[in-house]
Amino acid sequence: MISSAMTDAAILVPPPMTLPAPSSLLIPLQVLTFFAHLLLVNILLGSVLLAVLDRRSAATEEKNGVAFMPKILALAVNFGIAPFLFLQVLYGNYLYPGILLMAVWWMSIVMAVMLAYYGLYISDGAIRTSRRSAVLIPVALLLMGTAFLLTSASTLMERPDQWWRWFQEPYGLILNTGDATLLPRYLHIILASLAVGGLTMAWRAEWSLRCPGVDREKVLHRRRRGLTWFFHVSLAQIAAGLLFLFTLPGEARSMLTGGDLLFTAALLLALAGLAAALFLARRERLGPASLVTAGIILVMVCIRAMLREALLRPYHASPAASPSTALAMPHGQTAALTMFLICAVLIVPVLLWLARVVLRAFRNSPGTISPLGKEEN
Amino acid sequence: MEYPVWHFTGISSGLLIAVVSVLHVFIAQFAVGGGIHLVWTEYRARRQHMPELLLWLERHTRFFLLVTMVFGALSGVGIWFSISAVNPGATSFLIHNFVFFWAAEWLFFLLEVVSLLAYCSTCRLTREGSMPPETHRRIGLIYAAAGVISLVLINGIITFMLTPGQGPSSGDVWDAFFNPTFLPSLVFRLALSLMLAGMFALFTASRIRDEAVRRLAIRSGAQWIIFPFFLLLAGSAWYFAALPPDRQDAILRRTSDIHPFVKTYGWILPAVFLGGVLAFVKSDHLRRPLTVLILCAGLMLTGSFEWIRETGRRPWIVEGVIYSNGVSVAQAERAGSEGAASVSGWLRAFDDMTGAGSDTAPPAQVIRLNGSLTRGALLFAQQCNTCHGLGGPRIDILPLTARLTPEGLAAQLQGQGKRLEYMPPFAGSQADRDALVVYLKQAEASHRPGPIPGAEYFKPRTSPSAD
């Protein structure tokens, strides 16, 4: 039944365009940049959520308490661009129809993020610091909404069999609610954000220990509290992960549960990582726990990319699939790629230099907490 | 054609892109010029020992950050989001061919974000002596350089769309990037960027309390409008001269979609210059409202220029390769002989569902069609809606079709793109044209009650094999 709907839906999939570079290069670029984006999003969303849920420990009312948030948002948006770009190259013929079906929602993402961004600056600039959290509540809602819409977009592109709904609803108001994985996936993301938010809370406490004249007792409590958040949320994540696994279409699920060696090994690796991270968090080993968590997220991003390929394979392979369109300007692409890679290498020392001089200036300055802190006028 | 369409026929879908991109370009170019302006003004203020000017600059930097990094960055994402929803065919074409230029631009954007955050958060530290002024200036220089390089990268792609040059024929993406208008456009945009930096400087400077400092800041801001103006004039002329004759004709064409904007551009250009001169001469009396007016003029200048560039490109997204409505030349040819459905899976699916098409079995998914989706509506959305609204803003099609009888309209569709060279050819068969005529005439009737002239004689041929 599913497969017949699939062959039918293959008629809706536009022809792909020839890739300007091998996919063995584009896919890692997509995966790595998406990993960075996701990490930043987790830090931001988790921190904002915890600022609302656990105001005291999030320390948002302290001096510079939310100043890091708009900066992380700026970086998260920036790091969203690259994976979106590579995704369009790799899967544009699936991505665009998905976007189009939810065009109104899609456009509202931009508005939501912009409002959240200004909200963060308003919260940062609030004269009465007790007002900060009140502003953060709408910001949290906007960011949660954004995460939901992006989850919907990235799943709708994988479900051409849902695209028929366009014939009923061509106004760009479709969400991928027909997909059983949508809510478990979303839950997965929100919980991951909360877990990373817990780690962020602990790191902020750790860093503030260096400031002269802090209340060590209080700060250590915040550090512990952050790790506790991480621990409990990650436990809940196991349940959410299982739910997600069991809503996946049968074929994809069986690949992850023994059917495909690579898929299964990756999933087991992530689970082992989770066990290690939970253990480390209990031991209050913040650095190692964070590193392992980043590793888990990277593995998850890889699984996600493999899963997408597996879900879409029947459509590429369908007899109804259109042949790909040739690239209009295939020459000089290698040189362009080289230019990109050279720029990427050259930019790193500049970024490091910037970080160094800013850190040094903050260290020289008496009474400033961190470079992520707010400058006062 | 291969993609579905976001169905909102009232206004033209191109209008959405136009509004988002004009706002974005306005702010993004301010970001480019503003970087240079910040570094230069800081340098001068330090050399001439003007601490009050530095204090204003600190506030201006924060304003700059809030405007460019929040609105500028997100409206940039907004352009991208809207073109991918409104014109996926064309977006896919550009992305695939220029992905590494865009990727490089992303890197410089990252550098812009980091260096601007660094610059802004160390203004006070520099004032208090925790950071050497040279280091602060160097951070500013990195920001300014990253901004200019971003502009260079995006400029190559934008100008390619208007003047593809050798790119499509040689198949080399670098020929496409360094196309005939690459340099004039770069000069033009840099000049405009500097002017915008001056306009925004006037805006914040008008609120400085200290009279002497205010005069200084305003006069300096005004100079940033006055001097680059000449560069802008030269750039405009060079840009126009570098266009091939058919594009020049397109810009001078007197259709309602372009002529008013060319006129606006001609008026607003000297007005902006006069605004700058006025601000300089009357610097003591410059108040916020006038600076807002000057900014509006800057927005109109940017807007009319971008509009002319976009419409002057018609009927192309990329000349000779892909039309404004996202239909490629090859698709249009194939559709002309085999029907629109031959190049559109969505149309094929529609035909299957309604039984209008071939003998293939109906899809397994049975769906109740949306009432407003007819074959003609689909064709209109796919091929006309990027330029034409239907009973709404931007080249409303209804008054245009009202002048024509159904046969006249069918004939105009058949010849579309030949006589009226600003429109792409209609990509479809006789049956497709008939379906579109029926749709447009019905839409006309429902918007303007009364009999449709000539309708009673019009007998659309519905068999798709009629061609």
Image (tube, coloured by chain):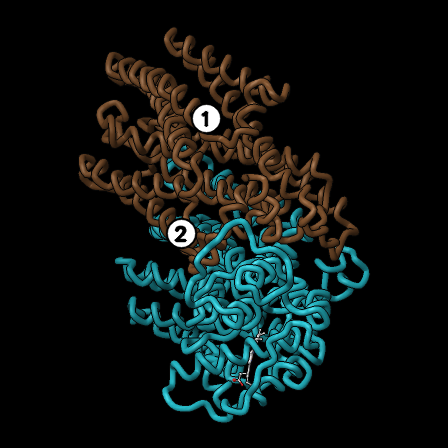
Chain colours: A brown, B cyan
Seen from the viewer's position, the closer of residues A318 and B88 is A318
Mark on residue B448? Answer: none
Residue B64 x, y percent position in the rendering: 40, 52
Chain letter of the residue beneath label 2 in the structure image: A
| Pointer 1 or 2: first along the chain | 2
Give the position of the N terminus of chain A as an image quadrant: top right
Residue B193 x, y percent position in the rendering: 51, 62
Mark 1 is on which residue type? Answer: Phe
Residue depicted at x 53% and y 72%: B376
Seen from the viewer's position, the closer of residues B46 and A87 is A87
Q: Is residue B228 visible?
A: no
SS class, disc 1: helix
Mark 2 is on which residue type? Answer: Trp
Tally of numbered tags: 2
Chain letter of the residue beneath label 1 in the structure image: A
Residue A210 x, y percent position in the rendering: 35, 18
Q: Nearer the viewer, mark 1 or mark 2?
A: 1
Residue designated by label 1:
A246
Q: Quadrant of residue A142?
A: top left
The answer for how far apart the CA atoms under marks 1 and 2 are is: 28 Å
